[in-house]
Amino acid sequence: MSKQLKKATFAGGCFWCMVKPFDTWDGIHSVISGYTGGDTINPSYEEVKHGNTGHVEAVEITYDPEVITYEEILTIYWRQIDPTDDGGQFHDRGDSYRTAIFYHDDEQKVLALQSRRELAESGKFKDPIVTEIRPASTFYPAEEEHQDFHKKNKAYYQEDRAKSGRDDFIKNVWGEQV
């Protein structure tokens, strides 16, 4: 294990759906649901959900770069979202559900910009890639009931994810089962 763990922060719509895809990879030490990008200090779920804080729902990933690279984590991220939708993600609508990559250092910024450019040039999407790439700011962990939601509320999580359209989108675009 590396002595230097790193952080990666992503917004991809509902944070409940963004934890599990990262949670299963070797080298991922933790995935925390929370809020970032806005001005309100220590916002609540209800405040962020109603869109008055400037924050987005996001996940903060702690990982070992000797086991999993930031580039690999970016690939996982892009395959969880619709990067062309600036109004939210799937059935979660509004500013608090927009997509964004929050970089923690210059290397992450360069890699995120490169990966977005490569995705745009791939021809995978007709519409422009609108996912923002922004400097990381204070990350506020969400309330405990939102942490590991896919494990704590498995049936509800599966039902909500199924009706969201996310899995159908991933399968249609990437040809993968989720």
Image: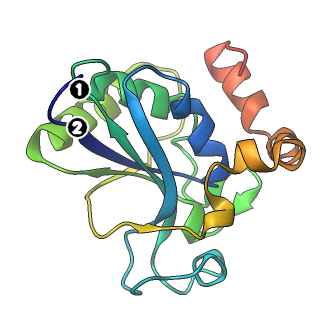
Examine the rendered structure and indicate whether residue 86 appears above or below residue 65.
below
Screen quadrant of the C terminus: top right
- The numbered mark, 1 or 2, whose residue comes first in the sequence reads 2
Seen in the image, is 111 located left or right of residue 54?
A: left
From the top left corner, tell me how far across and down residue 111 is, in percent. 21, 32
Q: Residue at x 64, y 55 (%)?
A: 14
From the top left corner, tell me how far across and down residue 166 is, in percent. 73, 38
Question: Looking at the picture, which amino acid does disc 2 mark?
Answer: Leu
Circle 1 is placed at which residue position? 65
Q: Is mark 2 on a helix, strand or loop?
A: loop
Q: Is mark 1 on a helix, strand or loop?
A: loop
Residue closest to the far top: 175
From the top left corner, tell me how far across and down residue 121 is, in percent. 36, 23
Circle 2 is placed at which residue position? 5
Q: Which residue is drawn at 67% across and 81% down?
A: 46
Screen quadrant of the N terminus: top left
Question: Looking at the picture, which amino acid does disc 1 mark?
Answer: Pro
Examine the rendered structure and indicate whether residue 46 appears above or below residue 32.
below
Q: Which residue is drawn at 43% across and 19% down?
A: 26
Q: Which of marks 1 and 2 is in front?
A: 2
Pick the residue in front: 128 or 137.
137
Question: On residue 164, which mark appears?
Answer: none
Q: How far apart are marks 1 and 2 (CA)?
A: 7 Å
Instruction: Answer whether labels 1 and 2 touch (C-beta < 8 Å).
Output: yes
